[in-house]
Image: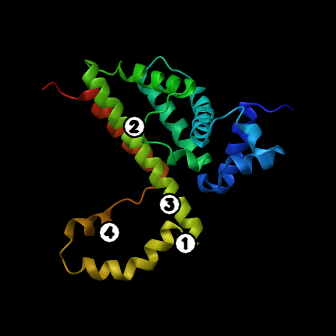
Amino acid sequence: MPLSREKIAATAIRLADAHGLDGLSLRKIAKELGVGPMRLYDYVTNRSELLDLMVDVVYARIADVEQHAEWRATVLAIAHATRDAALEHEWFSDLLGGRPHLGPHALAVGEATVAALSQAPGVRDIDDLQRASGALNALIIGAVRREVTERRTARSTGTDEAAFQASRGPYLMRMLKTGRYPTIARLVIDGAHLNAEETFNHNLAIVLDGITSRPRT
């Protein structure tokens, strides 16, 4: 099969899925493809362009989500597809939150998202739309980065979040019994221990409710 940008991106994604971005280089990709490293420069000029290409492949899958007539259903579908993509390709979360991605599929996802948000009752002008988009992106990026970080930590330490909490339990209870942290004590003792997906869905609903019902100032 001849070399192409698509084949290079697919190989790069497979390597990044296995070894992370730190383990990714044009030399390793070339070796995987059985070609000399210089051949790749006919298709991608540098590592930065390669990352942009990889990211847009992932966005292509997000862009495939079904568009709904109701704005909220569309936003929920895109948000869940983004989370799913970040959990499947953990390196993807490392590239979120910086400068915007401008590949054609990234732009398509962005367009679908802001077009849906623009229909929300609480979005009356371009300033509202910009703030709503910013709040939604901050939630999604923060949530997936935290979830991916916890997964990586569990792998590197051999201790999942529940085991970590159990190991720190005696110390934490001693600190809480001092009475200096009453609100944290309520959270720890009385708060519901939701899993990552439940938390994501709950917080997403809160943000969208806020966008819907934001009062006039």
* Residue assigned mark 3: 150
Q: What residue type is labelled 3?
A: Glu
Query: Where, quadrant-wise, is the C terminus in this rendering?
Result: top left
Q: Which residue is drawn at 49% across and 48% down?
A: 197
Give the CA distance from mark 1 to mark 4: 22 Å
Mark 3: which secondary structure? helix
The residue carrying pointer 3 sits among few (fewer than 14), some (14 to 19) or many (20 or more) residues within 10 Å by Cα, namely some
* Residue assigned mark 4: 189
Give the CA distance from mark 3 to mark 1: 10 Å
Q: In this view, does 36 lie above or below 150?
A: above
Residue 159's tag is 1
Q: Which amino acid does label 4 sit on?
A: Ile
- Quarter of the view holding residue 210: top left
Q: Earlier in the sequence, mark 4 or mark 2?
A: 2
Q: Earlier in the sequence, mark 1 or mark 4?
A: 1
Which numbered mark, 1 or 4, is in the foreground of this view?
Answer: 1
Residue 137's tag is 2
Q: Which residue is drawn at 41% across and 78% down?
A: 168
Where residue 25 sits: x, y (%)?
A: 66, 50
Give the CA distance from mark 4 to mark 3: 22 Å
Where residue 7 sits: x, y (%)?
A: 76, 35
Where residue 5 sits: x, y (%)?
A: 71, 31
The colour scheme of the drawn protein is rainbow
Q: Residue at x 69, y 37 (%)?
A: 9
Q: What residue type is labelled 1?
A: Thr
